[in-house]
Image (tube, helix red, strand yellow):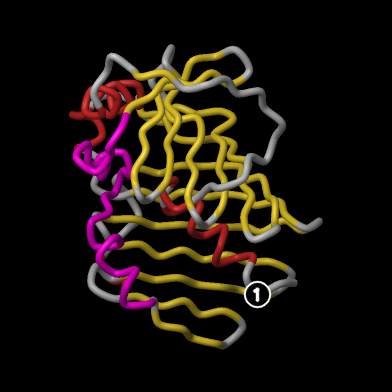
């Protein structure tokens, strides 16, 4: 098993802003045109589509259980989040990998090797929210374009972090692109009136995977002790 596989797909699970460069499925794109919407309106529409700002802000903690299928393996993953803190544990073939961020610093531990998170990654991690969508900053996006993929319109936000494709009809995030790889949200599930990605197709570093969410638990089962 390549050691890179679990850290990369952990990043996909933590935040869609961490993924995308190449498209993992064949798509037909047309030239972009300028949208009439502002970046704030696109983000506000996304938050509304997920369940509304009030519902999202009422979520203090999440536990998200996934199955990652990659390289002929199935990796079980459980991620706990509370504010900008998280703990993610992946298990595959009797091996376990853990990533922990306590709000100030963090580390990964894979096959007995503990590695501190790079200092240049900490500022972005400190800005994260329990619900990723609440961390989107409209001021960080320079442009809002409309692009067609397979005949559908998407409002595209671009920044130095990557590009984010929001379905013009539903408001939901469809694809995210950045230097780390590619993620396409193929479907969503609803838990207590809030939508979460249910199936993600991811590609990065020459690796491909599908990430299937099997269970989401809100406001229960997470404490400060989890991030020590």
Q: Residue furthest right?
A: 72
Q: Which residue: 32% across, 58% down?
A: 222
Task: Tell me the crowding category of disc 1: few under 14, some 14 to 19, or many 20 or more residues within 10 angstroms, Cα based.
Answer: few
Image quadrant in which the C terminus is located: bottom left
Q: Position of residue 204 (x, y in %)?
A: 62, 55
Of residues 108 and 19, the one nearer the viewer is 19
Which segment did they paint magenta? 118-143
The quadrant in which the N terminus is found is bottom right
Q: Nearer the viewer, residue 19 or 69?
A: 19
Taking depth in this image into account, of 126 and 68 the one nearest to the observer is 126
Asked whether 124 falls inside the magenta stretch, the response is yes
Q: Is residue 144 rendered magenta in the image?
A: no
| Residue 179 drawn at (x, y percent) | 50, 55
Q: Is residue 223 above or below residue 39?
A: below
When asked about the image quadrant of residue 152, the answer is: top right
Residue 226 appears in view: no
Q: Is residue 213 above or below residue 152?
A: below
Q: Element under label 1?
A: loop
> Circle 1 is placed at which residue position?
3
Q: Which quarter of the picture shows residue 118?
A: bottom left
Q: Residue at x 52, y 57 (%)?
A: 180
Residue 83 percent location from the top left of the image: 24, 54
**Residue 131 lies in quadrant:** top left
Residue 129's spot in the image, x, y percent? 26, 50
């Amino acid at each position: 098993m390549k050691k890179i596989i679990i850290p990369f797909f952990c990043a996909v699970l933590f935040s869609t802003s961490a993924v995308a460069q190449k498209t993992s499925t064949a798509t037909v794109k047309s030239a972009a045109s300028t949208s009439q919407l502002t970046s704030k309106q696109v983000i506000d529409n996304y938050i509304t589509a997920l369940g509304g700002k009030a519902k999202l802000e009422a979520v203090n903690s999440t536990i998200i259980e996934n199955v990652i299928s990659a390289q002929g393996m199935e990796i079980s993953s459980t991620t706990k989040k509370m504010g900008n803190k998280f703990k993610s544990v992946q298990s595959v073939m009797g091996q376990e990998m853990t990533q922990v961020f306590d709000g100030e610093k963090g580390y990964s531990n894979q096959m007995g090797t503990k590695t501190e998170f790079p200092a240049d990654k900490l500022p972005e991690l400190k800005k994260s929210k329990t619900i990723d969508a609440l961390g989107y900053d409209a001021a960080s996006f320079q442009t809002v374009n409309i692009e067609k993929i397979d005949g559908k319109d998407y409002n595209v936000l671009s920044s130095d972090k990557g590009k984010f494709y929001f379905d013009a009809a539903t408001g939901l995030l469809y694809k995210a692109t950045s230097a780390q790889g590619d993620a396409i949200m193929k479907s969503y599930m609803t838990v207590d009136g809030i939508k979460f990605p249910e199936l993600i197709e991811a590609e990065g570093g020459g690796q491909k995977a599908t990430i299937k969410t099997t269970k989401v638990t809100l406001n229960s089962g997470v404490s400060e002790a989890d991030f020590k």
